[in-house]
Amino acid sequence: MPTCGRCDAHVTRDEPRARMRFRLFLSRIALASSPRLSAHAKLRADRGQAAVFASAFDEDHRMQIRVRYFAAARELAGCDEEEIHVEGARLCARDLLSLVAERHPRLSGYAERMRVAVNGELTSADHALGDGDVADVLPPVAGGNPVALVGVRSTPLSIDECLAAVTHPGAGGVAIFTGIVRDHADGKAVARLDYEAHPDLAEKETTRVLAEIAQEMPGVRLAATHRVGELAVGDLAVVVAASAPHRAEAFAACRLAIDRIKETVPVWKKEWGPDGEAHWVNLEESD
């Protein structure tokens, strides 16, 4: 399949208009390269070349996706299925859920908990859809909410609480991570930590992170709690638990959850030394 050297667009026999514009584009390049053209004529040719290039490829980056809705998703959308025409060269499963939530406002409050299957296969949130794909929007199954517990609190955390939240008869493996305040960091002594969280966004972002992982790894169940306020050395700062039918998935989901929580959830840490000096972690002046 011929491919344009400047982009990922393809010119095929099934796209006669694109092929015609592509040939016109090539002819403009040859015209602009002619030594016999005046500077003004070359400028006009260059402009024509850019316009043809844009029309040849940008206009043909349109996808048609057949979207089917099941169970509660069907009732919220108010239809069994629909054809969606998408402008642009790329659409992932996460984007599709956002798109259908905009089209059907009753879906918007549930979209993050739904999964997408493409052409009969469950996919991750980052899976790229293609023209002509069939996408199924799937609500949570009867086995329960895969995000079993999310909490940001000033009271001491409980490992047993997170363990109980993810334990169920179908879980053959449970992995638990605990983050504990240690007495040193970067070669310096630490006397205590202060944690501060955004009052609205911390739990919402934690829920989003766990829901995304549950979509990427069907069959896992997750829980996460984070403490805020003043913590002493030895206190639990965060507890994450993940269950799955097998241990490999439980380990992977637990690791993924704590890594993404640390990366995106708006919780800030302030370290205090024995001498009373303190600093916010990861806060550095710009060069």
Image (cartoon, rainbow, N blue to C red):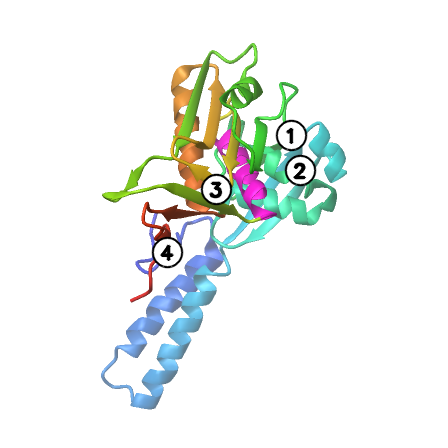
Mark 1 or mark 3, which is nearer to you?
3
Residue beneath the point at 46% across and 33% down = 238
Crowding at mark 1 (Cα within 10 Å: few <14, some 14-19, many 20+): some
Element at label 2:
loop
Residue type indicated by callout 1? Pro
Span highlighted in magenta in the image: 199-216
Q: Is tag 1's residue or tag 3's residue first in the polypeptide sequence?
A: 1
Name the residue type under label 2. Tyr
Reading the image, the residue beneath label 1 is 139
Q: Is residue 203 highlighted in magenta?
A: yes
**Secondary structure beneath label 4:** loop
Depth check: give the residue in front, 241 or 179. Answer: 179
Of tags 2 and 4, which is closer to the observer? 4
Position of residue 147 relative to residue 21, above or below, is: above
Residue at mark 3 to residue at mark 2: CA–CA distance: 35 Å
The residue mark sitting in front, 4 or 1, is 4
Asked whether residue 128 is in view, the answer is: no
Asked if marks 1 and 2 touch (Cβ < 8 Å), the reply is: yes
Q: Which residue is drawn at 66% across and 45% down?
A: 101
Name the residue beneath numbered marker 3: 230
Left or right: 15 in relation to 65: left
Label 4 sits on residue: 283
